[in-house]
Amino acid sequence: MREFLHTKLDIARDIGGAKVYAGEDIISSVPPTVAEIVENGRVLLMCDRGTARIASDVAAAMKGGGFRVSAHDADEDFEPEEQCRLVLGVGAGRVAEKCKAVARELGAECALLLTAPTSEKILSGGGISQVYLDRDVLAACPRRCYAAGLGILLARPVVEFDRMFDEKVLFSTRSEAEPSAVVRDPDAVSLAIALLSLGADDDAFVAGAGEGGLFRPSPCDAVAEVLSRIALSKGKTPRLRGEYMFVTACALKRFYTLFLSSPSIDTLLPVDNDAALSRLAALTGRDRAGLLEMFDFCDVNSYFRISYIVGEYRLDFIDRLSAIDLAAAERKWRRTYDDAGYFLRSAFTAREVTEAMALAGTVSGGLLHYAATTGFLDRVAAAG
């Protein structure tokens, strides 16, 4: 057994089958910790442009521990060496996904030094054996990265409301979970652990989705993607997904309350979503036929059955929404930025948010999907 100059890390948490290690100045302790899953051999180290300096320190530590290291940018087009026994990522969501894909291709182990808490999907789908959280590295990430992760966490009550809606109205087979506890003022490490836990919990939801029908993205996710596409179509640099998700959650909470409080929705007839299909295809570059699979063209009987169930649970839904307090969360979230959220003025407009909700509602789940089916959102977007 190789002797290391530094001791291995202690496990902070076991999340979704991955061992999560946290501490300060932990890079030098990564090699002996990695040795628990891969004692020796070649390591494929992957990073992106923003994490190259940290990756260099990790590479030096791994070489000092006796590992052979091949380093590549995650955006490179390269052929990974077949003899690599470990894929080690230094970065966040995009790097993690690339590392998991390459590790599956090679049949290798996969580990990640997380540099920014920007995504809850790091552990979704499995594939990562170890995650390292360096307190100093995470604390030094850009403010917008922290805000993106916090936005995902703060948006969670609205995501769970839509899941509850699907369970009541569409008879989803997933049992309703207790609302996730939201860490109100987390440091970067606590935020990262909370996001990793969310991704591990979501695996059960995705795995069981097929039993209750076609899995659809949450409205927050769907609207966030459309907002990003709208920004690209107008030549703007998109914000991070978590930033869009929290703004979307705030907009949806207000819209849902107004929509459910209006008895006039009982008189609305289902609309033809062909125009929305064409607009989504143009924005996303996806094939119309592929998008068509996500559309739900229910027959008249199904539509009025769903409308009846929504009416039956209307007050319950409104009560659930009233318990979601986003006012304080909005202030906390904006103040994570140096400019206290002034960027919102140029990132998107109210019209763009409304358009994104109308388009995303056709392919998402939850109450937004029902509202889009009634044509209510199209009318709101046209009036805006």
Image (spheres, rainbow, N blue to C red):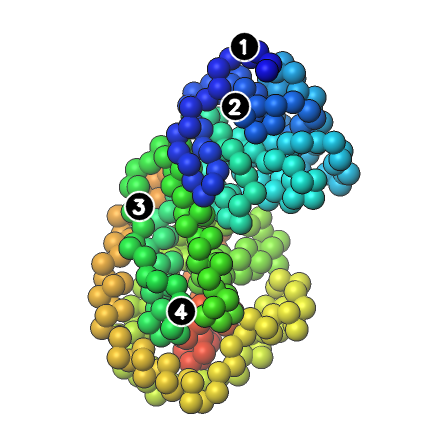
The answer to whether mark 3 and mark 2 are in CB contact below 8 A is no
The answer to whether mark 3 and mark 1 are in CB contact below 8 A is no
> Callout 1, which amino acid?
Leu
> Callout 4, which amino acid?
Ser
Viewer-closest of 268 and 294: 294
On the picture, is 222 further left or further right than 341?
Answer: right
Q: Secondary structure at mark 4?
A: loop
Residue farthest front in this picture: 1
Mark 3 is surrounded, within 10 Å at the Cα level, by few (under 14), some (14 to 19) or many (20 or more) other residues, namely some
Q: Residue at x 61, y 35 (%)?
A: 109
Mark 2 is surrounded, within 10 Å at the Cα level, by few (under 14), some (14 to 19) or many (20 or more) other residues, namely many
Quarter of the rendering occupied by the N terminus: top right
Circle 4 or circle 3, nearest the eye:
4
> Callout 3, which amino acid?
Val
Residue 33, numbered label: 2
Image coordinates of residue 235 in percent, x first then y, are 62, 53
User: Label 3: which residue?
Assistant: 182
Rounded to the nearest angstrom, the CA distance separating label 3 from label 2 is 30 Å
The disc, 4 or 2, on the residue closer to the chain's N-terminal end is: 2
Rounded to the nearest angstrom, the CA distance separating label 4 from label 1 is 53 Å
The disc, 4 or 3, on the residue closer to the chain's N-terminal end is: 4
The answer to whether mark 4 and mark 1 are in CB contact below 8 A is no
Residue 231 visible in rendering: yes
Viewer-closest of 284 and 4: 4
The disc, 3 or 1, on the residue closer to the chain's N-terminal end is: 1
The disc, 1 or 2, on the residue closer to the chain's N-terminal end is: 1
User: Label 1: which residue?
Assistant: 5
Mark 4 is surrounded, within 10 Å at the Cα level, by few (under 14), some (14 to 19) or many (20 or more) other residues, namely many
